[in-house]
Amino acid sequence: MSTTERPDSWAITSPRSDRVKRIAALSGRSARRKQGRFRVEGPQAVRSLLQHSAPLVRELYVTADGATAHPDILELADAHAIRPRDVDPSILRAMTRGEEDGAAASMAAPQGVLAVADLPSASLHAVLDTLPDGPLTALVLHGVQDPGNAGTLIRAADASGARAVLATTGTVDLYSPKVVRSATGSLFHLPVVAGIAPEDLSPALHDAGISVLATSGYADHDLFTTELPTRGAWIMGNEAHGLPQEMLDTADLAVRIPLAGDAESLNVAIAATVCLFETLRRR
Amino acid sequence: MSTTERPDSWAITSPRSDRVKRIAALSGRSARRKQGRFRVEGPQAVRSLLQHSAPLVRELYVTADGATAHPDILELADAHAIRPRDVDPSILRAMTRGEEDGAAASMAAPQGVLAVADLPSASLHAVLDTLPDGPLTALVLHGVQDPGNAGTLIRAADASGARAVLATTGTVDLYSPKVVRSATGSLFHLPVVAGIAPEDLSPALHDAGISVLATSGYADHDLFTTELPTRGAWIMGNEAHGLPQEMLDTADLAVRIPLAGDAESLNVAIAATVCLFETLRRR
């Protein structure tokens, strides 16, 4: 008799089972790399995953309440021949243990739906090759560290019509549960490439006919009055330190966001929002 | 011999002293109400407090490293006849224990500077009376629950030149350590009124000649193409539920933020930023 765990036939009854432990371990970056997978929690993110990136889905867990509340998710899964597994809420909670911090764990109510998916592996060049001709906006994260900020940035990029999100090495892992949660589905709406070597970024963007756009408190050009290129990628830097000079030097255009009040600086998500929606407004 | 703690002469050597416990308790809303005070952590927020609201300051604690790194804070304190007290970093850490959640506690390195201040008590009418004539923007938080969002909203309002931030009952306490931290000083740059009864809001704004502006995904008017009143207050609602219909009904103008991508909705801080900076751009 084999003790091998067979995905669709064994009920998961113990929160201490190997499967639950393996999924809980996906809270950590090293486990995500080792397993090549990440965890997607909650109906909104899982729905978006099924709609836009169903081939990545490896496992889908739904509680009885989750199934009642979200029949559309079961239909989507069925359309992609993905078989959801019934689990008790206590099992789902155990699968989201092991968060990087206490707050996330307490916030992380997966609301009856959880998926495990393959980490996407698209390369920068592959994604840039698929972008359409004509006016286009992209967002680049260069050293953004806070998972909540990263998720909000991805969501703002999506809402403003950006066509890709790129992240250099040194940026928070975009597949951490906290980023996936704060991006609320936008992570699967548009192409995302992580782990780009900073020195590769500008040459690749220029090859694709995309200008590199940066913000700086010291820039001469005012965002609201400067002509913007029709194809541009906004680069946003670290929360505390902003963009390093060597990255600013590669920018084709640096603009200053007008600050009217006494605030000394802008939160990176706020700065990106102002730039992304001003670009959208001009279209 | 009295055992009364005298502020300027007794060294604080025990992290379990009553004074430390009293300051740590300010992590909780009920202790803040009971004591009538709140805690301000870190050089940026304390500097802003001293610059803009020095009369509120009751206690100021600085470590040796904090004093070396921020001589300007000691000068500001001196200018306002506030006597800082030397403390060991372990005492400062103990003063920030008792956070509402684990993440905040671990993030909350007060960086050598901490103040205790009186809770401001300005009334809505008093603040509205001090506002200048002419073009003016204000921000209203109606049921925003996440402290990080509230802080970011206050910071965005400040940066966009808003002249006041108002919060109705049912909004997160703006004087919780997490809000104070995420607002990074903007909480003291501009007048803030909390605890406003929702039904008092629109009449008071109208009396001050300020239009009530709301966002709604179902509004007919597009933010980018609609004429905005010269004096307006943007009302932002709860993260999950948005603005309740009865509040939308009191709005003089509801606009839709154009969404270009597949995103279903905007984070409240992102939505507010788009509205506030579009208002600034038109000025």
Image (tube, coloured by chain):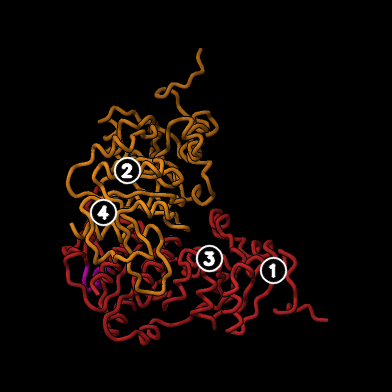
Chain colours: A red, B orange
Rendered-image quadrant of the N terminus of chain A: bottom right
Give the structural element (helix, strand or loop) at label 4: loop
Whether tag 3 and tag 1 are in contact, CB under 8 A, the answer is no
Residue B160: mark in rendering: 4
Closest to the camera, between mark 3 and mark 2, is: 2
Q: Which residue is mark 1?
A: A87
Q: Are marks 2 and 4 on the same chain?
A: yes
| Residue drawn at 26 percent across, 70 percent down | A281
Cα gap from disc 2 to disc 1, whole angstroms = 51 Å
Tag 3: amino acid: Pro
Label 2 environment density (alpha carbons within 10 Å; few <14, some 14–19, many ≥20): some
Cα gap from disc 4 to disc 3, whole angstroms = 32 Å
Closest to the camera, between mark 3 and mark 1, is: 1
Label 4 environment density (alpha carbons within 10 Å; few <14, some 14–19, many ≥20): many
Name the residue nearer the viewer: B160 or A19. Answer: B160
Label 1 environment density (alpha carbons within 10 Å; few <14, some 14–19, many ≥20): some
Q: Quadrant of residue A113?
A: bottom right
Give the structural element (helix, strand or loop) at label 3: helix
Label 3 environment density (alpha carbons within 10 Å; few <14, some 14–19, many ≥20): many
Give the structural element (helix, strand or loop) at label 2: helix
Tell me, yes or no, whether the highlighted magenta stretch contains residue A249.
yes
| Residue drawn at 50 percent across, 74 percent down | A48
Cα gap from disc 4 to disc 1, whole angstroms = 48 Å
Write down the chain letter for disc 2: B
Cα gap from disc 3 to disc 1, whole angstroms = 20 Å
Whether tag 4 and tag 3 are in contact, CB under 8 A, the answer is no
Tag 4: amino acid: Ser
Whether tag 2 and tag 4 are in contact, CB under 8 A, the answer is no
